[in-house]
Image (spheres, rainbow, N blue to C red):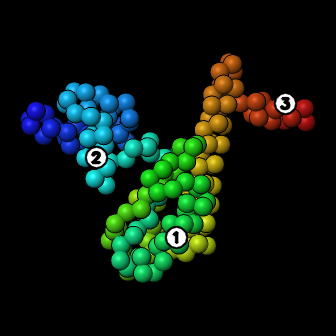
Amino acid sequence: MGGKRESLLPTLQAIQEEHGYVPDEQVGELASALGITKAEVYAVASFYGQFKFNPPGRHSVKVCAGTACHVKGSALVLDEWSRLLGIEPGQTTSDGAFDLDRVACIGCCSVAPAVMVDGEVCGCMNSAEVRAVFNEVSARDELASRAAGREGASADEGAGADDGTSADEDAGRGADDAG
């Protein structure tokens, strides 16, 4: 049994790597394979900050709770992110757009309070800055979504064209021919 327990952490890490988090069904399978309870697996996994139990969002928000950030108001910054996203730290929005975490330190004490959004550091944060970053990320998402929708529509429209020209080019040619 000791040898099996030694594989608990590496197996949890492999599961997290594969899925981006540790799904409950995987916890059950792992517990069964190791001959331990799900509670024992969760007890070990929840001890380590590296393991997540919810699917990650498309955008990851990490609010620093280190000493410098804490002293400069990171709790208020975290509260503002929670309010905007409608989730608590450790959760993912229902649409899968954002996940929110409180982290021990991101090493950016000189720009406290600091937040890391999709790996990019945002410093000297306050409620207004949180809203600005949130709006910027959301706007980029909306543009990307629209662009993806246009690409799909363009591919569908172009599928029936014999000569590879678009409807706009055909309309422009007709106007030139008429004059």
Q: Amino acid at mark 2?
A: Ala
Tell me the kind of residue under disc 1.
Val
Q: Secondary structure at mark 2?
A: helix
Residue at screen point 41% across, 76% down: 69
Residue 34 shows in this picture: yes
Where residue 166 sits: x, y (%)?
71, 30
Q: If you read the primary sequence from the N terminus, does the residue marked by circle 1 or circle 3 appear first?
A: 1
Residue pointed to by mark 3: 174
What residue would you read off at disc 2? 43
Q: Nearer the viewer, residue 157 or 12?
A: 12
Q: Is residue 140 above or below residue 64?
A: above
Q: Residue at x 57, y 66 (%)?
A: 80
Image-quadrant location for residue 81:
bottom right
Badge 1 is on which residue? 77
Percent position of residue 3, x then y = 8, 35
C-beta proximity under 8 Å, tags 1 and 3: no
Q: Is residue 59 visible?
A: no
